[in-house]
Image (cartoon, rainbow, N blue to C red):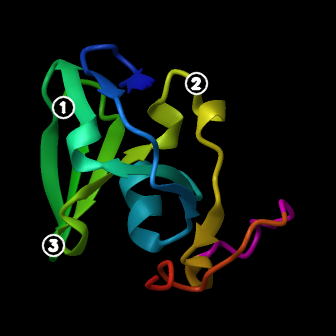
Amino acid sequence: MLTGGCLCGRIRYRISGAPIGSTVCHCVDCRRASGAPFVGWVSVPRNAFQLVAGATKTHMSSPGVERAFCADCGTPLTYRHAAFAGEIDVATGTLDRPDDAPPDNHTWTSQKLAWVQLADGLPQYPRALPEP
């Protein structure tokens, strides 16, 4: 089981199922939503994610995309895309033990900042992950 929450502690969550995958996203939207040069996400089945304390505020950041965050401290917590209704992406940095969900790959490297050098040997995709 994975657990986590926001910076101020008002929001807590648990993930009861195995992750579907984990990525580091370099897209402009993730950078702007987080204020970071890239964002780690762990994807889990939607029904495996449960808020156990507090409530998130949501924002539709683009068509079909809903981002949730803590309205008190601003911590970005989740990402949902309408095309993948059965999944939810949880910001890896909000996990209590982020090392338990290492990334499998890098996505949207076509939008990666020029000064970010990727040397971890993980697969890199210029856009989203290819369809299975």
In the picture, residue 12 is in which quadrant?
A: top left
Q: In the displayed structure, does residue 85 sit left or right of residue 49?
A: left
User: As shown in the figure, which amino acid type bears the numbered disc 3?
Assistant: Gly
Query: Are the residues tagged 2 and 1 within 8 Å (C-beta)?
Result: no
The residue that mark 1 highlights is: 71
Nearest-to-viewer mark from 2 and 1: 2
Say if the magenta span includes residue 122: no
Q: In the displayed structure, does residue 67 sit left or right of residue 18?
A: left
Number of other residues with Cα within 10 Å of mark 3, as a class: few under 14, some 14 to 19, many 20 or more:
few
Q: CA distance from mark 2 to mark 3?
A: 30 Å
What secondary structure prevails in the magenta region?
loop
Q: Residue at x 46, y 46 (%)?
A: 19
Residue 17, percent from left and from top: 38, 37
Q: CA distance from mark 2 to mark 1?
A: 23 Å
Q: Decide if residue 119 is in sight here.
A: yes
Mark with earlier residue (2, 1)? 1
Helix, strand or loop for disc 1: loop
Residue 34, percent from left and from top: 42, 50
Mark with earlier residue (3, 1)? 3
Q: In the displayed structure, does residue 124 sit left or right of residue 47?
A: right
The residue that mark 2 highlights is: 97
In the picture, residue 18 is in which quadrant?
A: top left
Q: Decide if residue 35 is in sight here.
A: no
In the picture, residue 20 is in which quadrant?
A: bottom left
Is 68 drawn above or below residue 51 in the view shown? below
User: As shown in the figure, which amino acid type bears the numbered disc 2?
Assistant: Arg
Is 100 drawn above or below residue 131 in the view shown? above
Residue 33, percent from left and from top: 36, 55
Q: Nearer the viewer, residue 67 or 53?
A: 53
User: Magenta part of the protein: which range?
Assistant: 112-120
The residue that mark 3 highlights is: 64
